[in-house]
Image (tube, rainbow, N blue to C red):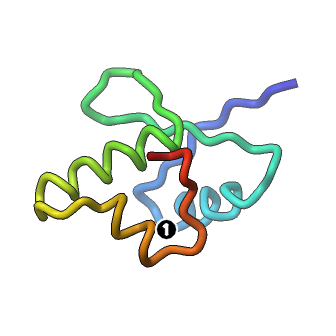
Amino acid sequence: MTVIAEIDVTRPTGRKIVRELENKRCVKLRYENPGDSGVWHNLDDVIEEGLDTLTAHYGVDMRELMKIHSKTYKKNVV
C-alpha cells in the first residue's frame, strides 16, 4: 500500500517532518518544482540540478569538490 501526503515545507513543522522522513528506508520523497506546474522530481534529480546551478554560478566543478571533501559522496551520482 502507498500513501501520498503533501507537506508544506515553507513552515518549520513541515521541514522537520521531511527531515525525519528522509532518514527512513521505506520512504521515497519527491519534490515539486514550483516552476513546473505539477511535475515531480526525485531527490537525486534535485541534487543534480543544484550542483549544475552552483557549478555555473561559481565557475567551479562542485562534483569534484564533493569528491574531495565528502566521505559520503556517491560516485554513481556523477
Kindly identify the residue that appears in the image at 80 percent across and 26 percent down: 2
* Vertical side of 45 occupied by 69: above or below: below
Toward the viewer: 4 or 65? 65
Q: Identify the residue shown where x is 55% and y is 45%.
A: 76
Q: Is residue 11 above or below residue 38?
A: below
Q: Position of residue 34 (x, y in %)?
A: 31, 35
Give the quarter of the image for residue 66. Answer: bottom left
Q: Could you say where residue 67 lies in the image, as x and y percent from the top left?
A: 45, 67
Q: Is residue 24 left or right of residue 75?
A: right
Q: Horizontal and vertical percent for residue 6? A: 57, 38
Q: How many C-alpha atoms fall within 10 Å of the one at disc 1: few (<14), some, or many (≥20)?
A: few
Kind of residue indicated by mark 1 = Pro
- As drawn, which residue projects farthest toward the right? 1
Q: Quadrant of the N terminus?
A: top right
Q: Residue at x 61, y 42 (%)?
A: 29
Rendered view: 5 above or below 57: above
Give the labeled residue for mark 1.
12
Secondary element type, mark 1: helix
Q: For this rendering, which residue is in front, 65 or 21?
A: 65
Residue 24 percent location from the top left of the image: 78, 55
At 70% from the left and 55% from the top, the residue drawn is 21
In the picture, measured across the screen, residue 78 lies left or right of residue 7, that is: left
Task: Decide if residue 2 is on the left or right side of residue 47.
Answer: right
Q: Is residue 15 above or below residue 6?
A: below
Q: Is residue 74 left or right of residue 68?
A: right
